Image (spheres, rainbow, N blue to C red):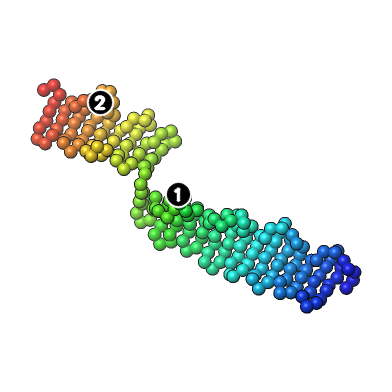
């Protein structure tokens, strides 16, 4: 005991250290080292490090949390590492890895150590990349930076040149499978194949058509 502002007091509650009129250490069932805004707290629940009045590191029940648990932080345990924004899980790293939030209409990437990489809507696969590649639902487009060059939907596949002209169209929109090779525009030459046969055309006009054993030449 030096002065009332600089002292160490031992009583039934434990040991309290005061410096400059401020309590800088308490050693008891709950031990505290530091000021109220910057301190280390140790008790039977674990260890907490507070900096600038925010708990930035917490160790309890085999889990280490780094960051403000009310906001963005990381938690680590023997189960893996989790990145959170408050209670929302943004990423999880373990034997399998999840990047992104898992929830209704939320997109995420799931990396399965055994089966490959999956792009998902919530837990539903949109695309999977493993021994095979599978794309599910919607329309797939390959774009050269200016326009879609290949578009695959549930009813058609269209291959387009750099000018935006359709070079190959495979479709079944009306229930009749049709393949068109070349531009079906104006008087441009193209070939169309259906269940009924094959036609060499100018635009959409048949010039020569083949159906079964019959060949028809326009104007003949």
Q: Quadrant of residue 78?
A: bottom right
Residue annotated with mark 1? 105
Q: Residue furthest left?
A: 213
Of badges 2 and 1, the one in the foreground is 1
Quadrant of the frame with the N terminus? bottom right
- Measuring 22% from the left and 33% from the top, which residue is drawn there? 192
Q: Nearer the viewer, residue 70 or 157?
A: 70
Q: Examine the rendered structure and indicate whether residue 191 appears above or below residue 9.
A: above
Q: Examine the rendered structure and indicate whether residue 209 appears above or below residue 9.
A: above
Give the percent coordinates (x, y) of residue 48. Answer: 67, 65
- Measuring 74% from the left and 74% from the top, which residue is drawn there? 28
Residue annotated with mark 2? 203
- Measuring 38% from the left and 56% from the top, which residue is drawn there? 130
Q: Nearer the viewer, residue 44 or 181?
A: 44
Q: Secondary structure at mark 1?
A: loop
Q: Secondary structure at mark 2?
A: loop
Label 1 neighbour load within 10 Å: few <14, some 14-19, many 20+:
few
Give the percent coordinates (x, y) of residue 6. Answer: 87, 68
């Amino acid at each position: 005991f030096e002065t009332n502002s600089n002292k160490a007091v031992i009583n039934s509650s434990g040991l309290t250290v005061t410096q400059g009129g401020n309590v800088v250490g308490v050693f008891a069932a709950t031990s505290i080292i530091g000021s109220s805004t910057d301190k280390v707290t140790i008790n039977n629940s674990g260890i907490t490090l507070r900096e600038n009045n925010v708990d930035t590191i917490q160790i309890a029940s085999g889990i280490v949390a780094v960051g403000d648990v009310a906001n963005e932080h990381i938690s680590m345990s023997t189960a893996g590492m989790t990145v959170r924004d408050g209670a929302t899980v943004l990423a999880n790293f373990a034997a399998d890895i999840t990047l992104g939030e898992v929830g209704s209409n939320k997109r995420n990437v799931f990396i399965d150590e055994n089966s490959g990489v999956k792009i998902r809507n919530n837990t539903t696969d949109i695309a999977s990349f493993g021994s095979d590649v599978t794309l599910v639902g919607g329309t797939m487009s390959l774009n050269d930076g200016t326009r879609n060059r290949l578009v695959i939907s549930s009813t058609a596949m269209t291959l387009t040149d750099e000018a935006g002209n359709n070079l190959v169209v495979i479709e079944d929109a009306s229930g009749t499978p049709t393949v068109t090779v070349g531009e079906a525009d104006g008087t441009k030459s193209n070939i169309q194949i259906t269940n009924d046969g094959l036609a060499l055309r100018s635009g959409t006009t048949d010039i020569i058509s083949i159906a079964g054993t019959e060949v028809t030449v326009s104007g003949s």
